Every structure is written in structure tokens, then in C-alpha cells.
Amino acid sequence: MKKRHRFMAGKGLKDVTALNKCSACGRAKRAHVLCPYCVQSIRRWFSTGFRSRQETEVGKEEFYERYNEERRIQGKEPIDRLVEEEDSEKARARAKAKSA
Ligand SMILES: [Zn+2]
């Protein structure tokens, strides 16, 4: 065993005992630290311009309707929204796998 490993022995991470419940969502979180679930939901909220999930869904619906209308005028096949979203999801996963 290396000398460094000998010195590192017994200096691992300690168990976190300072836990409590998030007052907003009720999940367990570390005391005096922001709840990661709530922080994520607030970040999502910022990225969507303070719209509710329902509102963003409606916005997407409208976008696809307008887009398909344009395609119809150009004489192209309309795009199925669900298929499109699945494709973009796959593309994102591929990009992630490539960068990792
Ligand atoms: Zn929370």
C-alpha cells in the first residue's frame, strides 16, 4: 500500500445527520441548505419565463399549429408534434452521450 493511502485511511466522508424536511415540498433536505428539488423547479420556472406548465403546453400547441399551417401552405406534410418531441429528446440524449 502506498504511503498516501495509509495517510488517507479513516478520513472519508462523514455521514450527514443534519437533515430536515423541506417546508415547501416536504422532501428530506440538508438543514441550512436550499432544497435541490425546489431549486430545480425555480430554475425551470425562470427558463420558461414564469409561465405555468399548463401555459407552456398551450404555447407549444399553438406553435405547432402555426408551423403546420405554414407547411400546409408550402404544400408540405404537417409534422406530428409528439414524434418531433421524441426525436429531439433522442438527439439530446445522443449529444449528451457524445460529450460524456
Ligand atoms: Zn423542496
Image (cartoon, grey):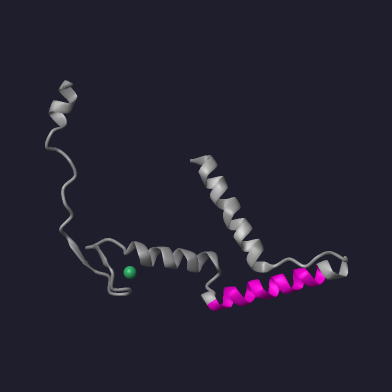
At a point 62% along the width and 62% down the height, the residue shown is 85
- Tell which residue pokes out farthest to the top in this image: 2
| Image-quadrant location for residue 54 | bottom right
What are the residue bounds of the magenta stretch? Answer: 54-70
Nearest the eye: 39 or 37? 37
Please give left or right for residue 94 compared with residue 24 in the image: right
Please give left or right for residue 16 compared with residue 73 in the image: left
At a point 57% along the width and 46% down the height, the residue shown is 95
At a point 18% along the width and 21% down the height, the residue shown is 2
Please give left or right for residue 29 compared with residue 11 in the image: right
| Image-quadrant location for residue 59 | bottom right
At a point 55% along the width and 69% down the height, the residue shown is 49
Nearest the eye: 66 or 52? 66
Q: In the rendering, at what x and y percent does residue 72 appear?
A: 84, 70
Please tell me whether residue 10 is drawn above or below residue 57 in the rendered image: above
Q: Quadrant of ligand 1?
A: bottom left
Please tell me whether residue 11 is drawn above or below residue 93 in the rendered image: above
- Quadrant of the snapshot with the N terminus: top left
Q: How many marks?
A: 0
Q: In the rendering, at what x and y percent does residue 3 appear?
A: 15, 21
Nearest the eye: 37 or 84? 84
Residue 4 lies within the magenta run: no
Q: In the rendering, at what x and y percent does residue 80 appear?
A: 70, 67
Q: In the rendering, at what x and y percent does residue 19 appear?
A: 19, 63
The prevailing secondary structure element of the residues shown in magenta is: helix
